[in-house]
Amino acid sequence: KNLPPGPTGFPFLGCIPYLSKYVERTFSQWSKTYGPVMFLKIGNQPTVVLSSFEAIHQAFVVQGVEFSNRYHTYFTKCSCEGGFGILFLHPYKSWKVQRTFGFRALMGKGLGGNSIETRILTQVEVLLQHLKQKNEQPFLLEDDLLASVANIIGDIIMKEYCDKEQNEKLLNYVFESVKSIRTSAFVFMAVSMFPWIRFFPPICGQFNEMKKGMKIGSDIFNEIIEQHLKDSEFHEARDFTDLFLLEYKRNTPGFSKKQLLYYLKDLIAGGVETSVSSIRWMCLHMVKYPEIQKKIHMEIDSVIGPDGNVTLSCDLPYTKAFIQEVFRTSPPAPIGVPRATTEDLYFMGYFIPKNTQVMANLWHVHHDPTIWPDPTRFDPERHLDNNRQFVKSDKIIAFSIGPRSCIGESLARKEIFLFFVSILQKFDVCGNKEHPVPCMKGAPGIVYSPYPYKFVMKLR
Ligand code: HEM
């Protein structure tokens, strides 16, 4: 049927035995033999892997609607009761309505109270206080950062704060769900491909734990939704949930309480670990490249000063180039979130059947030597023009591209800029004496995160 070329796998297992821990790197290697559009089987899942900017652009932008479904498995169906929320929602028409709504709400449109920037800066201030309290002792940044980032999303979507005083249950849920993102990639893949495996140890134990966690999350979010329903008569819309419930009360199709519950869960699942891991990557690069840290300090000192206000409009071209270079070398979602084709279709001369899983190898595009000379060299300078102005690249696609790209991109970019610049304004980010040089290879998993590392933050 003129399927794209690709490696022949084993019966039943497909190409799984050939895959390394870093699947994006294996795919990248194979694309040298089979080209930018490759067909293979992962277990029993027919899969197309796209490995060039042109192929991803053609699929996700030009033929964006035909490639807009998500690939459903037993596991994904379990995690969203068959397709509620936004992450696994299709068909396109229902998804589009929810997407337009969510996109506006996350930009702060229709929300009363503080702007998104102010909401982020409030949490940045809390984090800086925590960092000061570390008294220059080595510590793991992720827990404090996680609580701050979760608080921002919590504030925007449901006016809830994930901390011990305000909502400890929510805090625990966020920590547990991030832990599960970090450690359960294997269970996720195994149950997705072979649903029967969930009955056998050791998978059954881990799978049941995950299901328990999902149930706890549902109870917490249901409570929040019911409370909002009671309060909402008396307020202007404070958050995403209030805005959604306005549509629910108007009986707008698709705006049910169950849909809201899973939407909230998806925003937490998609928005916390990805942003936290990006900021951790940036701090690790500060330790690894002190000369780059020096340049960033100098730029911040000259543009903002030691006590000036960090805002989104601060003009910091070198710092922005650095952030873009970190997105290039360490994209938090190296193969994105798998899509699926909505129908039998023709694509770049090949036939692709309906409901084929589609993975975009974003990591490969970021390391393509025809776009990035010497791609493994970490060099922020490549994103500056001759006048040392920052050049935003459309070939860095950490948030993916097209109509179904990341819904939280704008929020994440704001968070990452404000957190990173504020930390660097106040601190020297240093390594610890025991392990002065951090490991720069990330942990394989659903999100590509750094391994835990103890930083020392010295007040400047
Ligand atoms: C550095 C931070 C982030 C990165 C690198 C990232 C990356 C991605 C990628 C690659 C996708 C797949 C898009 C596609 O299929 O083409 C995605 C989807 C998604 N992201 Fe993010 N993301 C980040 C932050 C966030 C934040 C802050 C939120 C929530 C506020 C969020 C929520 C989502 C959701 C809900 C989806 C599914 C969208 C849909 O299916 O329509 N993400 N993200």
Image (tube, helix red, strand yellow):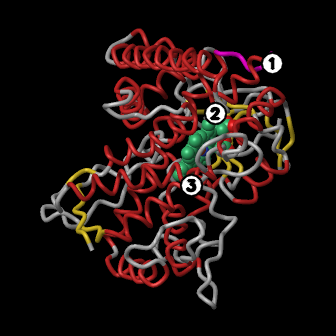
Residue 244 pos. (x, y %): 69, 27
Magenta-tinted stretch: 250-257
Residue 338 visible within the image: no
Q: Secondary structure at mark 2?
A: helix
Three-letter residue code for mark 2: Phe
Q: Provide the residue designation for mark 1.
A: 250
Vertical position of residue 4 compared to residue 30: above or below? above
Q: Residue furthest bottom?
A: 386
| Label whose residue precedes the other's in the sequence (2 or 1) | 2
Q: CA distance from mark 2 to mark 1?
A: 16 Å
Q: Is 425 left, or right, of 413 in this rendering?
A: left
Three-letter residue code for mark 3: Glu
Tell me the chief SS of the magenta region.
loop
Q: Provide the residue designation for mark 3.
A: 117
Q: Residue sitting at 49 percent across and 61 percent down?
A: 418
Q: Provide the residue designation for mark 2.
A: 240
Residue 271 pos. (x, y %): 53, 41
Q: Residue sitting at 56 percent across and 55 percent down?
A: 117
Residue 58 pos. (x, y %): 80, 52
Dividing the picture into quadrants, the one containing residue 391 is bottom right
Q: CA distance from mark 3 to mark 1?
A: 30 Å
| Marks 2 and 1 close (CB-CB < 8 Å) | no
Three-letter residue code for mark 1: Arg
- The answer to whether residue 252 is magenta is yes
Q: Is 118 left, or right, of 359 in this rendering?
A: left
Vertical position of residue 206 compared to residue 383: above or below? above
